[in-house]
Image (cartoon, rainbow, N blue to C red):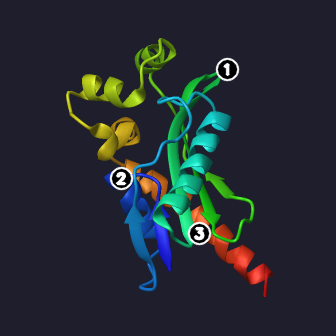
Amino acid sequence: MKIVIGSKNPAKIEAVKQAFTLKEFNFTAVDVPSGVRPQPFSDDETIKGAVNRANEALIQGSGQIGIGLEGGVHETSYGLFLCNWGALVTSDDEAPIIAGGARILLPEPIALRLREGMELGPVMDEFTKIQNIRKNEGAIGIFTAGMINRADMFTHVTKLLYGQYLYRLNQLK
């Protein structure tokens, strides 16, 4: 079965491979647009980006499953939280399967830059003096002292997607 990942980000690709471990799966990654702002600023916008990536991946990659993973931020009365969402779509035209993952409160100096219109990736590169942090440990890795990295965060979401997919398959039997 061919799974098409709607990103060439190594952390996202690794997350999907960690969740879908059976040998019967093969993976293709394609760069697809999220259809949302470069820095999604709500759960709804981040979900929409994940669903858009999954749908476009399925189309461009000609697979049986499309996976979209999207990171964003969500404002609350406690401050700005990091959020992440995923979507799984299949070629059978059923509704997308959606799952969300870990959330952490971003430090106020980082949140302020995002509220000013900056994107988290470049802000984190500047903050840490590490290039392409979003393709490696991500903000989650920095702000959890390496306890959780970006691939771990998205693996959790992808396992939630895969579990719901398996549940859906079993309900059809």
Q: Earlier in the sequence, mark 1 or mark 3?
A: 1
Does residue 10 sit above or below 142 in this rendering? below
Q: Position of residue 129 (x, y in %)?
A: 20, 27
**Mark 1 → mark 2, Cα distance in angstroms:** 34 Å
Q: Which residue is mark 3?
A: 162
Report the mark closest to the observer, 1 or 3. Answer: 3
Q: Kindly check if marks 1 and 2 are in contact, taking CB atoms under 8 A apart as contact.
A: no
Can residue 145 be seen? no
Q: Which residue is mark 2?
A: 8
**Between 88 and 83, which is closer to the camera in this rendering?**
88
Does residue 133 sit above or below 163 in this rendering? above
Report the mark closest to the observer, 1 or 2. Answer: 2
Q: Position of residue 48 (x, y in %)?
A: 63, 42
**Mark 1 → mark 3, Cα distance in angstroms:** 32 Å
Label 3 Cα neighbours within 10 Å, binned few <14 / some 14-19 / many ≥20 = many
Element marked by disc 3:
helix
Corner quadrant of residue 77: top right
Label 2 Cα neighbours within 10 Å, binned few <14 / some 14-19 / many ≥20 = some
**Between 21 and 92, which is closer to the camera in this rendering?**
92
Does residue 92 sit above or below 126 in this rendering? below
Can residue 130 be seen? yes
Of the numbered discs in the image, which one, if any, rests on residue 108? none
Quadrant housing the C terminus:
bottom right
Element marked by disc 1:
loop
Residue drawn at point x = 44 percent, y = 23 percent? 107
Residue drawn at point x = 71 percent, y = 79 percent? 169
Q: Which residue is mark 1?
A: 77
- What amino acid type is highlighted by mark number 3? Tyr
- What amino acid type is highlighted by mark number 1? Ser
